[in-house]
Amino acid sequence: MSEELQLSTDERVEALGRVPGFNGMKSAALHELAGLLLERHTRSQETIFRKGDAGESMYILIEGEVRIHDGNHVLTRLGSGDFFGEFSLIDRAERSASVTTEKPCRLLQLNQVDFLVFSETHPEVLLGILQTQVKRMREMNELEDKLSKSYIKISKIKQELEQQHQAVNEQKQQLLQQHTQLGELLEYKRKTTSVLIHGLKNPMTSAMTMAEMLQSQAPKKTDLAEYASILQQSLRRMDEVLNELIRTNEKEEI
């Protein structure tokens, strides 16, 4: 980009014609307004204005690229044909963001003072800018409406998730209670089984001893000896069952 070559009036008029608010003006008025534009050339990473500065002019970007940012947060990037800072033609409110060049840029600058003087003889330009601002306000209202609906939807989803989370927590608490109750029941079963087993074990041992004595004293091949043998076998099977119950109970205790 050469700084020596200045834009012609026709090129400036063409650039103005791309800016909402100016594109409806007559050719003669555009040519007059084009004569008020200042051509500015910048280096890369040069600050055009900072957030908080008083608004004094708008800019049309002819060549190059700029970033609009708030500190390190980049809001958007603009390139050739874009414009920014147009609200400052109406008031001197503080800039809401900073603008810094990303590349060497060629800009057309329109100062507020020159614009206001121009608007005295061309009031239609104020109507054009007002219509542009109204359009942007409507777009903002539409965006706000969409955001509001999105917020309601998100709030509803959030409420449903919270209810599901609460239900899961309640189920978790219920499972913990059931687990505790199951543990208590198992412990009660173990203790009760232990008492029953030992309550049966002692008389079982005595009965087995008596059956052995009876078998040893009874004459062989008599009904009494056969009865003593059957009784002894039955008691042994019952003793095996009790021993198995004792081993199972001990495992559950571990």
Image: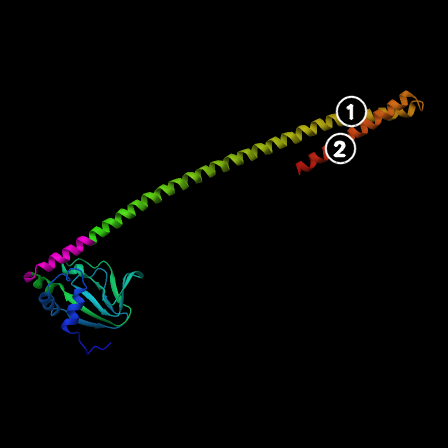
Q: Residue 16 occupies which quadrant of the picture?
A: bottom left
**Secondary structure predominantly adopted by residues drawn in magenta:** helix
Asked if residue 244 shows in the view, the reply is: yes
How is the rendered protein coloured? Answer: rainbow
Q: Residue furthest left?
A: 121
Q: Amino acid at mark 2?
A: Asn
Q: Is residue 54 visible?
A: no
Q: Which mark is residue 54?
A: none
Question: Which element is circle 1 on?
Answer: helix
Which residue shows up at 36% across the image and 41% down it? 156
Residue 200 is one of the magenta-drawn residues: no
Labelled disc at residue 203? 1
Disc 2 is placed on an element classified as: helix
Q: Quadrant of residue 251?
A: top right
The spot of residue 180 in percent (x, y) is 56, 34
In the rendered structure, which amino acid carries the disc numbered 1?
Pro
- Asked if residue 81 is positioned above or below residue 149 in the image, the reply reads below
Give the position of the C terminus as an image quadrant.
Answer: top right
Per the rendered image, the range of residues in magenta is 120-135
Q: In this figure, which residue is indicated by the disc labeled 2?
A: 243
Query: Residue 149: percent from the left, percent from the top?
Result: 30, 45
| 211 relative to 20 in the view: left or right | right
